[in-house]
Image (spheres, rainbow, N blue to C red):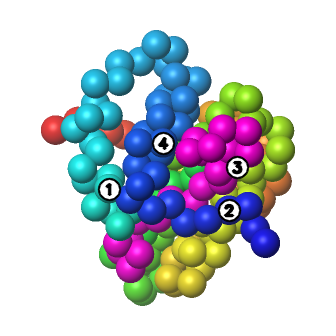
Amino acid sequence: MSLVRRAVAEDAEEVLRLRQVMIDSVRPASPTAWQAAALPALRTRLADPDGEFAAFVVDHPDRPGALAALVVGTLEYRIGGPGKPPDGLIGYVFSVATDPDARRRGYARACMDELLVWFRERGASHVMLTASPDAEPLYASMGFTRDTTPSMRLYL
């Protein structure tokens, strides 16, 4: 039996806690007030097994009710083009986190494997993510390569 399972609405607070672990690894002591506002929408998305959003988790082996690892992704539509699939579905991974006391056990890899299966089953042509320097070896070992397209962002 796999340690990995699909997250459900009741996992929402733990999903947000682990997302904060990921955020704090990049920007220590980041604010947490956003979590209360994010909780209702996250619960709704986790409750929809047929939606374009999925989280895969591993329950913490030493702390009942806590999660040890988390991977979250979404399907997105992009208009096809030269060299691009006509259906335009891509997967996007935006949260990968492991509780500090549960690292080096293969949990993040196992969660990523399940998310990649989920993407494939839904017809995604490829998967995108942003990797921290610490996580890049994991993704490279799974077949991810550096993207040469520069990215820009505008907050609205």
Query: Which residue type does callout 3 highlight?
Result: Ala
- In three-dimensional space, the C-alpha distance between marks 4 and 3, rounded to whole angstroms, equals 15 Å
Mark 1 sits on what residue? 43
Camera-near label (1 vs 3) is 1
Mark 2 sits on what residue? 4
Which comes before the other along the chain, label 4 or label 1?
4
Is residue 53 highlighted in magenta? yes
Query: Magenta residues: mostly which secondary structure?
Result: loop
Crowding near the residue tagged with mark 3, few <14, some 14–19, many ≥20 C-alpha atoms within 10 Å: many
- Residue at image position (41%, 55%) is 10
In this view, 65 is above or below 89: above
Coordinates of residue 107 in the picture (x, y in percent): 74, 50
Which structural element holds mark 3? helix
Which comes before the other along the chain, label 4 or label 3?
4
Specify whether residue 90 is in view: yes
- The numbered mark at residue 108 is 3
Which comes before the other along the chain, label 3 or label 2?
2
- In three-dimensional space, the C-alpha distance between marks 4 and 1, rounded to whole angstroms, equals 11 Å
Mark 4 sits on what residue? 14
Coordinates of residue 110 in the picture (x, y in percent): 74, 59
Query: Which residue type does callout 1 highlight?
Result: Arg
Which structural element holds mark 2? strand
Left or right, 36 with reference to 80: left
Per the rendered image, the range of residues in magenta is 48-67
Give yes or no for contact between labels 2 and 4 (Cβ–Cβ under 8 Å): no
User: In the image shown, does 27 or 5 lie closer to the viewer?
Assistant: 5
User: In the image shown, does 32 or 73 lie closer to the viewer?
Assistant: 32
